[in-house]
Every structure is written in C-alpha cells, then in structure tokens.
C-alpha cells in the first residue's frame, strides 16, 4: 500500500503488479520458514536468497546459471541496470518512462522494503519499528511526486501501517484468550461494559490519520520544488504574489544531449520572414553560484490583460516589428514554463498560468503544464544596429550590481581570458562581439556532447583549457566572462530555430533544445548572442559592416574555423536546412526540455488505472455492499420444508439482531431469544405493532430451537423488514447514516476469517510430524 505512492513517478504502472507478485512469494517463503520453524536469522536469509533469485529471474535471466542462480555476470548486469536507472532518473521528468533501470530500482526497492518490514513485524514480532522502512518508501515518493492527490497515497500508506499495528495487537491479546468485545455479558445487563482495547486502538488510529490529513491545511506551507502547484510557490489562484523557486532545470545534461530519438516537441507557424532568429525562450538563468547557473527566486503575478509591459531597457528609437507566432506542443511534452519568442507583447492561451515580469515568462499554476497546448504569442522582433549597441550608456547601478555578481570561487582564468580576448575593444558591445568570435571562430573550440568537463567551480576553467563542450558550457562561459568585464549577463534556456516543413510550419525537436547568453545594453535591453559553434545563428547586430569581418553571414548557421593542421575531419561542421531535413546534423537536448517519456499509456495501464479507481471507490462502500448482500441472502430464503425451517429462521433472526446492532443495540449472548426481543424493543423504542413483529420472530426461533419437529414459518422476512423500518424511524440521522455506510455487524467478517484461520492452523499443526529420539535400549 505504501508502494502505491510511487505510481505517479513513472508513466506505466505494470511494475506495481510485478512487485506485488514477487512480494507475495517473498512473504510466503517467510511464512513457510517460520512454520518449520527455522531460526530467525535463517528465515531472513532464506527470504533474502529467494528475493535475489526472483530478481535474477526477472532482470538477469540470460546472465545466470539455469536462469536462476546469479553469478558474476548477473551481478555486473545488475550494476549496469542500476547505473542506467540512476541516469534515467536524472534525465527524465516525472512521469518518467519505465526503462529497465528504473523498473529494477522500483521493484528491487519495494522488495527490499518488504523484506525489512516482514523481518521486523513478523519474524521479530515488532510492528512499530516496521513503520520506518514504510516511511522511507513513502517519503521518497512524496518528495518527488507532485500529482495533487498526495493525500490519497498517504491515506493508503497510513492505513496499511495501522492494519499492521492492529494485527499485532490482536495477536498479542489472543495469546491471553479470546479478545473481549467490551459488551455486557451479565444477565439483564443493558449497558456495554469497558471498551475493548482493539476498538480503542482503531479509533485512535483513525483519529491520528485524520489529524495528519487535516492539520497541514492550517500550517504554513513550504516551497519544496521548482514550482509549487498548491499555490504557495506559484501564488494563489486569486491574486498576485507567489514566487518561483531557485531550482536548477539543467540536470544530467550530457545524457540528455545524446538522445537517440529526435522527437518533435513543438510545431510552430510564424509571421517572421526570416525564421533563423526564431528562438523560443523558456526561462532565464540569472543566479550564478560558481558551479552552475539557475533561475533566481522571482515574484510572479497574474498574466496581464492585453498588452505586456515594454521589455526592460528597450528604448523608443530601436527598430522593432511585432510578429505573431502560433505554437502547438506535443501531448507528451509536459513542463511548467511556456516556450515563447522574446520579448513577448501578448499571449493568448488557455489554462492556469502566471507571469514573471523580470524574465517576461509564463509559468504554470496548480499543476498546469505544456502538454498538448496550442497558443498564440505576439512578440517584438528587435533590430538594433551595431552603432546603437556600441553607444549604449551605462546601465543603472542596481541592475549592473545584480547581473555582474560573480562568486569568489570562480577561477581567475575566466577573467584573465576575458581580458585577453577583448583587448583593444572600445565598448561593452565590442567586448561581447569579441567573446562570441572567440568561441565560434578563432578560439579553437569544438562542439562535443561526449566530453566530460567536470563539475564544480573548476568546470569553466577546464572547459576553457580543453576547449570542448556543448551549448551549456559555451553559454555559461561567455556569460561568466561578460560579467567579469562588467557587462550584465544571464543565460537563456529554450529552443533554437527548428526545421522548416513543406506546409509552412517549423518542426522543433528535442535536438533543437538550446542554451544561449543574453547580455544587457541600456536602451536595447536583453540581447541575444550565440557563442556555440554549429548551433543556431549569429544575430545580425553582431556582424560589423567592415568588409574584413571574420564573423559569418548572419543568415547562416555559425561555422567553426577549420583546423588546417588536423588530418581528421572537424566535428564542427555547419548544418544547413537541407541536412537538417535529412536528419544529418547532431544536436542537443537540455534537461529543461527533456521528454517526459512514453507515447501515452498502454491499454493495460489504462485498464489497471480503471480497476484501481473502482477499487478505491468500492473500498469505503464495501461494508454497505456486504450488508446489503447478506440481508438479501438471509431474507430471500424460503424454509418451506422441515429441513429448511431451522436454517431459514435462524438466518432471519441473525439479520434482525445484526440490524439492531447496526443501530447501536449491542448483542448480548447471555439472553434468550425472548429476552433479546424485549431488549431490542426497549432500547429501540419501537411501537406496539413493530414490537409484535420482533416477538413473532423470537417465537419462531424458540420453536425451531426447542420443538421436537420444527415447523416452517411464513412471513418472517416481512416481519424483519418491518422491524428495520421501525428502527430507522426512531434512530437519529447520524445513527441511520452509520447503520448504512459503516454497519457495526461487519465485524463478523473479521471474526469469520479469524476462526477459519485458526481452524486451518490447527489442522496444519496436527499434520506436523513429531520427532522422537531413538531408544538406546537393545531389542
């Protein structure tokens, strides 16, 4: 039950069925080992070995002896699968596809937790500490999942733990004799006696779970994720406020950049004449801690009605054109930020979205994401000239202080290289152009998604030394170097221009995901640069008018300088639109826009979810359904022959007493049928006609119990139905609801199961052979 909290983490739930079957085998081995009985350590060892064999059979059958016994190859395969699972967890967003590595982590984790719980609760007979592994399992799931129904998973896990505690408590009490119910047993006693400990435990458990579910509603919330869909992290649905947490969206980038399948993420139709500048920005990363860039914690508000405010820093004398873009997202692409051209001036979209004014981005609220959306964006195509950028005045001290901040841990090589590369530049614009040229043309850098450039504060230093990396390293390095020169800078994450299609649309795939630096110039605002070789296009304003410019044609993808001294072909080839159509170019896919996995749920997954939904609905209604079925069976008999008379009459009597029990009149086994009838009439406050019906049924019971030859009785079912109506009429509303939805007499099911189990246990113990020591006497 606690493992159900892991279901939202992956796109398929078949692993849960597999885990349940394997867990049943594991528990069965433990029960058999304790029945022998084996010593406790041997019982745990047997369960562990069986668990290992089961995992080998499911995940490493071809690497094991006889498909069951794991050897060195099987253990190496397990290690490879676990490593793959760890990479997949970092690569995919929730819900992740059910890869072999993730499946091993889920199934293996559930079996390990199951073994710990079984060992503590059953083998060592200590149920309370067994809640710790269950808590660990639930905590992992709750910390990652954000599906809006966390209370349901908590309820299932808590109910399972309470059942474990109650089972242990009942077992301990049963060792002292029959578990007493707390009802009065003395002759003529009408009031219940002491409340049973088991019943008290159930009430305390239900109360504790209820408090755990309700109490958080009145406590201050904590933002624990990238966006808090409950409203605390994204703002309440009714007004302004809220924040975006500073959580880095770029995780396991190298794995994401090497995806094998370039699936279409977006289909774009734009009014732009030249779509080489059609970058779709998702989020800006402006907080640099020396290790990586990440989005700052920003205030968000409602989406402006109509036109957006003018972009920060954009002056009236800068040429601009407003263009419209229509974007359709894939039904599997779900993330919180909305891809848009920058700067947007108006957005038409359905759903719950919020506006972050500093980055001019839209973020989903209350679980809103980008799955299967079609929206329209009006944006500005800003066209500054080189002269306007070169003549830009100094930005405000506050903005410059915020966006030029660098940590003390940044290696000195970064600032030294920036000064060397930009030596002789007359303005911040000239410095920015020289930095772009350094990375794309004359610095000797190569684009390579396979390279390991390390992590931590030395990552940029190693990248500048080895001169190999992918878009994230180029953009991070240029933004850091620009800040070291006093130029406000940040990093944008989104999609580079996609591939034009025959129908006039643009297909944007996973490999078009990209990161690029944005530098701030007063009067122009945040301005895109492109330092990554072979990716995207160099902006037109970075191409000087001089004929001897070494920068490439802005209409073409940026090219890396050929290495004349190398005999091997360069990895940095240009990628023309024709080659892109033929899928002849490598590209990249940052984790911020990684696929959420799967082509949609399979039919059996849908069937399983439907059955699970029916089970969740049927569970609270099961007591009512059981009572209705039992009543129909008892009152639906005939009892026309002498052989059928006694079972029929006794069944009708059981229904009458159980109904009285449901309405709060506890049964008293010490009373005769006539005494029981008097008690039901008195406590139920029944009128004269209904009381006569009760006594007629009691008389029929006495006749079949004490008469030499029981006679069939007629009309008893109608008498009981009349009594049921009478009890319902005299009871209060709360008592009536409990009698229907939570009847007390359902406890007979538990008693019947307990009796059956005791009978089976007695027969099994009788079959166990008795070993005797051989006699030492001679024959």
Image (spheres, helix red, strand yellow):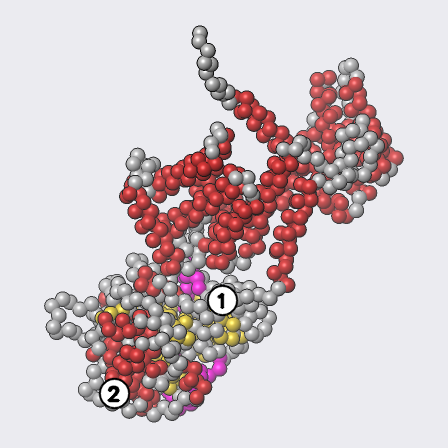
Task: Tell me, yes or no, whether the two marked residues, 1 and 2, touch with CB atoms within 8 Å.
Answer: no
Q: Is residue 439 above or below residue 12?
A: below
- For the C terminus, the image quarter is top left
**Is 460 on the left or on the right of 370, as rendered?**
left
Q: x, y (%) of residue 382?
A: 37, 83
> What residue sits 23% from the left and 81% below the top?
551
In the displayed structure image, the side of residue 397 where residue 632 appears, left or right: right
Rendered location of residue 79, percent (x, y): 33, 49
Q: Name above or below for residue 271 compared with residue 657.
A: below
Disc 2 packing (10 Å; few <14; some 14–19; many ≥20): few
Q: List the residue tagged with mark 1.
A: 227
Measure the alpha-carbon separation of dots 1 and 2. Answer: 43 Å
Between 744 and 329, the one lying in front of the other is 744
- Residue 252, above or below 482: above
Q: Which residues are magenta?
A: 308-335
Estimate the x, y position of residue 411 in percent, counting from the top left. 31, 76
Let me know if residue 286 is in the magenta part: no
313 relative position to 434: left or right: right
The residue located at (44%, 35%) in the rendering is: 42
- Circle 1 residues within 10 Å: few <14, some 14–19, many ≥20: many
| Nearer to us in this view, 461 or 247 | 461
| Vertical position of residue 58 compared to residue 701: above or below | below
Residue, disc 2: 423
Question: Is residue 280 visible in this depiction of the protein?
Answer: no
Residue for point 65% across, 49% down: 206
Residue 45: percent from left, percent from top: 42, 38
Secondary structure type for disc 2: loop
In the displayed structure, does residue 292 sit left or right of residue 619?
Answer: left
Q: Quadrant of residue 391?
A: bottom left
């Amino acid at each position: 039950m606690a493992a159900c909290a892991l279901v939202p983490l992956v796109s398929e739930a078949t692993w849960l069925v597999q885990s349940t079957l394997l867990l049943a085998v594991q528990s069965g081995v433990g029960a058999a080992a304790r029945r022998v009985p084996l010593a406790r350590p041997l019982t745990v060892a047997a369960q562990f070995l069986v668990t290992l064999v089961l995992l080998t059979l499911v995940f490493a059958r071809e690497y094991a002896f006889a498909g069951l016994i794991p050897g060195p190859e099987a253990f190496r395969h397990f290690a490879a699968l676990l490593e793959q699972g760890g990479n997949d967890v970092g690569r995919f967003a929730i819900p992740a596809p059910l890869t072999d590595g993730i499946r091993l982590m889920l199934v293996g984790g559930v079996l390990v937790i199951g073994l710990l719980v079984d060992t503590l609760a059953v083998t060592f007979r200590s149920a309370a500490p067994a809640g710790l592994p269950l808590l660990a399992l639930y905590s992992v799931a709750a910390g990652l999942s954000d599906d809006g129904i966390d209370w349901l998973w908590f309820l299932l896990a808590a109910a399972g733990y309470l059942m474990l505690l109650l089972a242990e408590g009942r077992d301990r009490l049963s060792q002292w004799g029959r578990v007493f119910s707390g009802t009065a047993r003395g002759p003529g006693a009408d009031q219940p006696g002491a409340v049973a400990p088991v019943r008290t435990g159930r009430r305390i458990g239900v109360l504790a779970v209820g408090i755990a579910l309700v109490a958080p509603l009145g406590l201050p919330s904590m933002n624990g994720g990238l966006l808090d869909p409950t409203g605390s992290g994204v703002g309440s649905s009714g007004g302004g406020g809220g924040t975006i947490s500073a959580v880095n969206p770029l995780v396991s980038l190298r794995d994401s950049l090497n995806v094998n399948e370039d699936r279409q993420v977006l289909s774009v139709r734009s009014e732009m004449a030249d779509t080489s500048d059609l970058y779709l920005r998702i989020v800006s990363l402006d907080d640099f801690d020396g290790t990586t860039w990440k989005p700052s914690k920003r205030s968000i508000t409602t989406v402006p009605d109509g036109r957006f405010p003018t972009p920060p820093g954009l002056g009236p004398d800068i040429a601009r054109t407003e263009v419209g873009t229509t974007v359709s997202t894939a039904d599997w692409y779900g993330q919180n930020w909305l891809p848009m051209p920058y700067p947007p001036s108006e957005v038409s979209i359905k759903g719950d979205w919020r506006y972050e004014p500093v980055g001019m981005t839209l973020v989903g609220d209350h679980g809103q994401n980008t799955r299967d959306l079609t929206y329209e964006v009006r944006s500005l195509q800003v066209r500054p000239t080189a002269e306007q950028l070169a003549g830009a005045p100094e930005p405000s001290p506050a903005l410059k202080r915020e966006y030029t901040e660098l940590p003390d841990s940044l290696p000195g090589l970064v600032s030294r290289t920036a000064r060397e590369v930009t030596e002789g530049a007359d303005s911040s614009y000239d410095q920015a152009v020289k930095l772009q040229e350094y990375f794309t043309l004359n610095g000797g850098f190569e684009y390579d998604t396979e390279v390991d450039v390390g992590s931590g504060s030395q990552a940029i230093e190693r990248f500048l030394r080895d001169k190999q990396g992918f878009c994230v390293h180029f953009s991070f390095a240029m933004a850091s170097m620009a800040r070291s020169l006093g130029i406000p800078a940040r990093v944008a994450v989104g999609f580079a221009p996609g591939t034009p299609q025959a129908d006039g649309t643009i297909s944007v795939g996973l490999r078009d995901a990209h990161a690029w630096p944005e530098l701030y110039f007063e009067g122009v605002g945040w301005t895109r640069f492109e330092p990554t070789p072979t990716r995207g296009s160099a902006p037109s304003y970075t191409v000087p008018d001089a004929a001897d410019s070494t920068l490439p044609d802005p209409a073409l993808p940026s090219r890396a300088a050929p290495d004349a001294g190398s005999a091997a072909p360069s990895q940095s080839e240009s990628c023309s639109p024709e080659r892109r159509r033929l899928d002849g170019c490598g590209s990249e896919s940052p984790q911020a826009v990684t696929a959420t996995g799967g082509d949609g749920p399979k039919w059996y997954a849908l069937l399983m979810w439907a059955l699970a939904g029916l089970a969740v609905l049927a569970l609270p209604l099961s007591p009512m359904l059981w009572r209705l079925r039992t009543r129909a069976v008892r009152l639906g008999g005939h009892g026309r022959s002498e052989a059928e008379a006694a079972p029929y009459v006794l069944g009708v009597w059981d229904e009458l007493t159980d109904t009285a029990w449901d309405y709060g009149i506890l049964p008293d086994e010490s009373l005769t049928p006539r005494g029981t009838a008097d008690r039901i009439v008195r406590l139920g406050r029944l009128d004269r006609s209904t009381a006569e019906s009760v006594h007629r049924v009691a008389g029929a019971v006495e006749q079949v119990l004490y008469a030499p030859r029981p006679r069939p009785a007629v009309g008893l079912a109608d008498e009981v139905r009349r009594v049921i109506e009478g009890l319902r009429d005299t009871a209060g509303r709360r008592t009536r609801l409990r009698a229907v939805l939570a009847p007390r007499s359902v406890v007979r099911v538990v008693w019947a199961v307990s009796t059956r189990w005791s009978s089976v246990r007695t027969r099994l113990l009788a079959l166990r052979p008795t070993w005797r020591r051989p006699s030492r006497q001679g024959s």
